[in-house]
Image: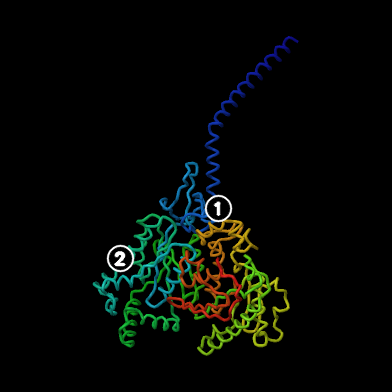
């Protein structure tokens, strides 16, 4: 028994000793955890901030009440970056607070270098300058800083305005002079890119037809951190397209005061000189790391190599949908509605006024007249079935319905599904009628007024003076609470822009005022800050004819509006 008691006492003593050591160790570890806790919490916050929150172009300027300029892309962790991607740390913007250690980059900055040098490649008259202008229009409208640098313009400024085909020969002196001009143009483009600290695009519009020249561009870009060279090669063998391009070339400054026959012969010789040295872009250039996009016959086929990241994906997708087929794009606001006369903000009901119905009749006649003119001019593809794009608001469908009813005998054939049998409040996705096809999309709906929907402008000004003042300060970026801004509308219209560029048919777009302004601004190159102030009258058709170097615009008033119809403020 004594030994039993002794054993129990020794066991209790050992357990107490071990338990005490464990508690002391736990206390020490607890103190260490307390010391490490702030660091771990900050690391956790940093990890959260490093998540990719949004992809959105930076519009610049100070945010107004309700604007979207505070929504930016937070820097992603290094493990999410694509292989070979570089980053210019100077292009980041640090948070003002010492606790906010994450960095903000421009759109696409997390996935590739912030700045891109797009270098055109191709023989003369292959549509390089046309593609350049289309890219500039799309990128600028999408919110990217973009500028083109044309080697031909640099040559003319240096005193070689009317250079003959000899200037483009393979002689040593001519080659040296052309290299100097190309280098000067390239240096201007790179210097412009270095001025920007976030995502931007410079377009180097030159022939760049040799491997040696392209490698020189790559080497120059590598001397500056964060600039990625991407080559866009235009290959065209279509005789019809080439003939059209040759005619346009003879109208530029090099041949403007020259006999047309002699000018054409000289230009053909110039092309032959380039052909003798032309080397198409291959996968093996720059040790297989070259980034390029190839276009065949202006959008007939597109190839991409090593083009990764948001920006280049957008560019490649856009280039795969472009063409140069002549066609018309007509923009018109919906017909006048009863709600509109009441000055109510938001989507209007389907009830059209008498003037609105009369406008629909005139709009149908206008389309018939345009088709006849296209048929007479020989534009076979354009004068086929017209496409009507419209929003899903009841007033959009009412406008189409009234337009079809007013000319049902000539537009809708027997047995074709007519929209007159459907309720105006439930527009279908597509309506097939003889003469055109109508399709609807919510992307074409009006700018969402949020909490202000259903109110008049007078009521907003009276009941929400702070909102009204913020809207007056910055109409482009102002966002209605729970609603949208013009920048939001521009963002959601990108698929519509691609559809308008892709379609070879002529298109009528029926929508509200804000959408009309944004679409008009895209095709005419209107600066962003002017979009909310564009004048787009009711019962008026604006005709756009995108061309090689500009967009022809004409408007036609088809019917008057009611005297009480309010003047648009938005």
Q: Which residue is found at the position 63% from the left and 18% from the top?
A: 17
Residue 208, position as x, y percentages in the image = 36, 70
**Label pair 2/1, CB-CB below 8 angstroms:** no
| Spatial CA span between label 2 and label 1 | 40 Å
Can you see residue 538? yes
Query: Which residue is the extreme one toward the top?
Result: 2
Q: Which residue is found at the position 69% from the left and 78% from the top?
A: 419
Query: Which residue is the extreme one toward the right?
Result: 1
Q: Residues within 10 Å of mark 2 (few under 14, many from 20)?
A: some
Mark 2 vs mark 1: which is more N-terminal?
1
| Circle 2 residue | 184
| Circle 1 residue | 53
Numbered label tally: 2
Disc assigned to residue 73: none
**Where does the C terminus fall, quadrant-wise?**
bottom right
Secondary structure under tag 2 reads helix
Query: Can you say whether 419 is above or below 200 in the image?
Result: below
């Amino acid at each position: 028994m004594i030994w039993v008691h002794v054993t129990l006492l020794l066991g209790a003593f050992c357990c107490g000793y071990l338990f005490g050591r464990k508690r002391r160790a736990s206390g020490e570890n607890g103190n260490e955890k307390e010391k490490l806790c702030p660091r771990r919490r900050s690391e956790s916050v940093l990890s959260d901030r490093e998540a990719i929150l949004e992809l959105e172009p930076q519009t610049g300027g100070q945010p107004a009440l309700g604007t979207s300029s505070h929504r930016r892309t937070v820097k992603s962790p290094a493990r999410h970056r694509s292989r070979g991607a570089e980053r210019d740390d100077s292009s980041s913007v640090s948070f003002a607070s010492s606790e906010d250690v994450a960095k903000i980059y421009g759109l696409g900055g997390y996935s590739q270098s912030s700045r891109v040098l797009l270098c055109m490649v191709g023989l003369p008259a292959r549509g390089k300058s046309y593609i350049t202008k289309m890219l500039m229009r799309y990128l600028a409208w999408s919110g990217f800083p973009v500028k083109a640098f044309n080697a031909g313009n640099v040559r003319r400024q240096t005193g070689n305005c009317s250079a003959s085909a000899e200037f483009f020969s393979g002689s040593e002196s001519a080659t040296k002079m052309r290299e100097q001009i190309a280098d000067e143009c390239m240096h201007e483009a790179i210097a412009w890119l270095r001025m920007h600290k976030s995502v931007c695009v410079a377009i180097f519009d030159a022939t760049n037809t040799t491997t040696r020249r392209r490698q020189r561009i790559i080497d120059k870009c590598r001397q500056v951190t964060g600039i990625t060279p991407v080559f866009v090669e235009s290959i065209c063998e279509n005789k019809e397209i080439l003939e059209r391009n040759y005619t346009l070339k003879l109208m530029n400054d090099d041949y403007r005061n020259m006999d047309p026959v002699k000018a054409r012969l000289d230009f053909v010789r110039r092309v032959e000189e380039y052909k003798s040295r032309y080397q198409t872009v291959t996968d093996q250039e720059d040790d297989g790391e070259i980034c390029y996009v190839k276009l065949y016959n202006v959008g007939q086929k597109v190839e991409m190599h090593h083009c990764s990241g948001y920006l280049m994906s957008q560019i490649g997708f856009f280039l795969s949908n472009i063409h140069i087929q002549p066609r018309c794009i007509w923009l018109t606001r919906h017909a006048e509605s009863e709600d509109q006369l009441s000055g109510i903000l938001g989507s209007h009901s389907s009830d059209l006024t008498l003037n609105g119905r009369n406008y629909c009749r005139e709009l149908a006649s206008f389309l018939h007249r345009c088709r006849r003119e296209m048929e007479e001019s020989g534009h076979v593809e354009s004068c086929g079935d017209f496409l009507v794009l419209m929003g899903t608001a009841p007033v959009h469908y009412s406008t189409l319905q009234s337009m079809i009813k007013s000319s049902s005998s000539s537009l809708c054939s027997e047995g074709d599904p007519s929209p007159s049998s459907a309720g105006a409040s439930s527009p279908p996705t597509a309506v097939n009628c003889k003469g055109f096809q109508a399709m609807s999309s919510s992307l074409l709906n009006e700018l969402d007024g949020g909490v202000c929907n259903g109110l008049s402008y007078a009521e907003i000004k009276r009941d929400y003076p702070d909102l009204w003042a913020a809207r007056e300060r910055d109409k482009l970026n102002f966002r209605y609470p729970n609603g949208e801004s013009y920048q939001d509308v521009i963002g959601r219209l990108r698929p519509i822009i691609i559809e308008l560029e892709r379609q070879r048919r002529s298109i009528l777009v029926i929508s509200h005022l804000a959408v009309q302004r944004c679409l008009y601004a895209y095709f005419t190159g209107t600066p962003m800050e002017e979009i909310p102030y564009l004048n787009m009258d009711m019962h008026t058709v604006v005709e756009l004819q995108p061309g090689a170097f500009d967009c022809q615009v004409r408007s036609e008033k088809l019917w008057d509006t009611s005297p009480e119809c309010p003047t648009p403020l938005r």
